[in-house]
Amino acid sequence: MDEAAGQERGTTERVLTLLGLLQQRQVWTGPELAGRLGVTVRTVRRDVERLRALGYPVHAGHGVGGGYRLGPGRDLPPLLLDDEEATATAVSLLAGAGAGAGDAALRALTKLDQVLPTRLRHQVRTLSGSVEFFPDGRTPVDPDVLMNLARACRDEVEAGFAYRRGNGGAVGDGVRRRVEPYRLVASDRRWYLLAFDLDREDWRSFRVDRMSDIAARTWRFRPRPAPDAAAYVQEGVASRVYPHQARFLVHAPAATVRARLPASAAVVRPHGDDRCEVISGADTSLDAVIMHVLLLGHDFEALDPPELVGRCRVLAQQLLTAGAAIAPAPDAQEP
């Protein structure tokens, strides 16, 4: 490859990276983009012009709050999708995200939303309402709610919503919460939002199906150092939210145990090569947690809470009693 061809390839890769950045957030300043790309602000301006020449609607604002943004244009950029293809793709992603297809569908939909023409958005919402899925155990979530929260995360703007606790209250009866939204996390059963709660001044995870009256504000926040979203939500779901919590040392590798436990059921931490720590919880009793770990089929030790050892002994005695009550099978007769 000659020098000119190498430079052209480098420019193309940089422009594609720039396009990806513009799809991640609503507004970027020139210096921010230059820092991410490792170039000068002048080079950023030239690359923006290259995107515009390809049909991408990149707008530039000046003054406080100004910067580059990828807005919905009159036409979709060339070589991407026509109206029918864009609508079909958006409907599939919108319905799939709401039905629990995972955060990959939501990420793709958030990018598409950046360039979807305004005239198609009403059509997308109308068509998505005609899509149904078989029940699969997941808690249903309105796709528009997911989109509103995904936009707030992407654009780094504050959000407010009413949040009801898990006490059976009606939707709309919750307390107002004001947060800096960071990430949406999909478990095997539900969607969660990791956010910094501005009134409680701490990180919180929220079940999306318990939210209502969601409103994204125009006030942008400066991102804070955030915990790992998936790990934070998983630990909260698997342990902190349950009234009965327990910790075990399981005599099996962490990878083996993780393969047997849903992510929403327990936190699994390696403890050497052949053991792992399992933190889990249950709504009913410690016995339910013990039986859950017992069914893994590996030896284990009860660690916390102190009464966990006593419950293990009680269950062990009950199992021995049940086994003794069953008459042994007669020995097979010799021919």
Image: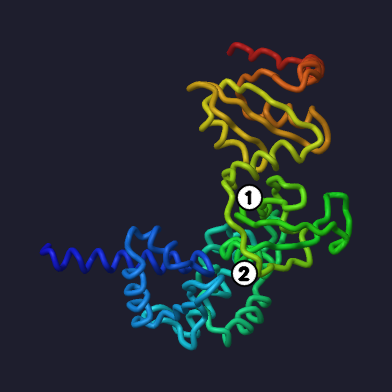
The residue that label 1 is drawn on is 187
Does 102 sit left or right of 325 as displayed?
A: left
Residue 150 showing in the rendered view: yes
Amino acid on which disc 1 is placed: Ser
Instruction: Check disc 1 and report its element: helix, strand or loop.
Output: loop
Residue 55 in which image quadrant: bottom left
Residue at horizontal 44%, vertical 78%? 58
Which label belongs to residue 79? none
Q: Residues within 10 Å of mark 2 (few under 14, many from 20)?
A: many
- Where residue 85 appears, as percent x and y from the top left, is 48, 80
Q: In the image, what residue type sits under mark 2?
A: Ala
Question: Nearest the camera: 15 or 323?
Answer: 15
Q: Dot 2: what SS?
A: helix
According to the picture, the residue beneath numbered tag 2 turns out to be: 95
Coloring scheme used: rainbow
Does 38 appear above or below 227?
below
Quarter of image, res 158? bottom right
Residue at the image position 70 percent from the left and 14 percent from the top: 330
Residue at the image position 77 percent from the left and 62 percent from the top? 161
Front residue of 237 and 202: 202
Q: Position of residue 324 (x, y in %)?
A: 79, 14
Drawn side of residue 155 relative to residue 288, left or right: left
Q: Nearer the viewer, residue 236 or 301?
A: 236
